[in-house]
Image (cartoon, rainbow, N blue to C red):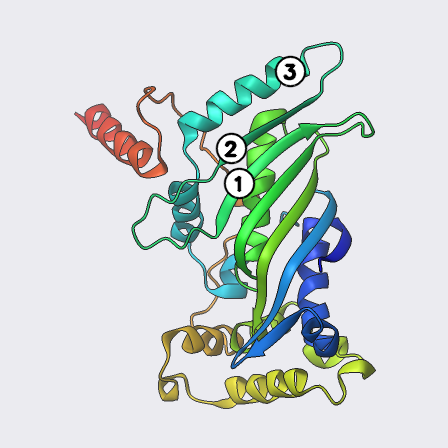
Amino acid sequence: MVKVHEFATSQEAWEGLNEYFFNYEEDILKNGGRYGSQLVAYNTFINIRKAWVDPNFDFGNMFGYRMQKWTGLINNYVNLNFLDILKSQILAKEETKYPQYNISMQFDNSHGHGKNCLLSLTFSRRLDMDIPVATFNLRSSEITKRLLLDLLLVQRIAEYIYGEEQHIMINLFCGNMYQNAEAFTMYDQHKKLKKIRTKESATSPWANRVMEILEKFKTIHPDEIKYKVFKRAVNQLQNVHGDKPMKTKDLPLIKKDIEYPEDCITVSQRRKYKRELNKQNKK
């Protein structure tokens, strides 16, 4: 059985899914399971009518992310050379009188420690729609810390192909989507969990566990936390590291400041090329 959700934007999808998991454990368990600190839903389909993440959403203050998280995501999953080929194929179709196409790209997994969470992305023009559709396939998705960043990546790829003014729809399919109780406590910085909790979750063991962890993380000394991933949540909730913003509007797919050689494909290669170029300019 496939569970279907529909949202107006990528931002709303991220918010809606996190709050749905938090408040409707019983519904999740009809097509999923609970394993320790994870509440899992299988075979989830999400229709997002517009690929859009709030430009001022702050991944830094929300999750403690740094720019390396974003560039690492691109460098691991996106082959920029293949992306340019995909773009040229799509734009060639767009220029025809009756564009109709389904053109796909496979995500890379360049790092040896990668988990292959992002599988493929297909861009389509359909007879019954007047905007392009991006079909996004995920092997697995942790919905609090990772999903919004992955949706932003799809948005940036679409903007790179079609331009920033083109309205794009996303159809997302994920075989294994889950919420982690400790990670979800950080959502309290975005919306207070006490305020978004519904009467349906009043007796939910999952929601009760989340609230217990939230209270603990807000009061415990960070040095008392053994696991690094839990300490991250504690540090964010207690604002241990201070203000280190990483806003959506400052996360481009490619910095368009210089022209790169054709064999400069990955983000790390381009960063190295830029360093060498800067050294030469200083001589």
User: What x and y, as percent, mark residue 35?
Assistant: 53, 78
Looking at the image, is mark 3 or mark 1 earlier in the sequence?
Answer: 3
Could you tell me which secondary element the residue under label 1 belongs to? strand
Q: Measured along the vertical axis of the image, is residue 164 above or below residue 56?
A: above
Q: Which residue is mark 3?
A: 93
Q: Measured along the vertical axis of the image, is residue 227 above or below residue 276?
A: below
Q: Which residue is mark 2?
A: 105
Residue ID at (64%, 58%): 43
User: What x and y, as percent, mark residue 6?
Assistant: 78, 53
Give, as a three-letter code, the residue at label 1.
Ser
Looking at the image, is mark 1 or mark 2 earlier in the sequence?
Answer: 2
Give, as a three-letter code, the residue at label 2.
Met
Q: Which mark is residue 62?
A: none
Q: Which residue is mark 1?
A: 120
User: What x and y, as percent, mark residue 45?
Assistant: 69, 53
3D distance between C-alphas at marks 3 and 2: 16 Å
Residue ID at (57%, 56%): 147
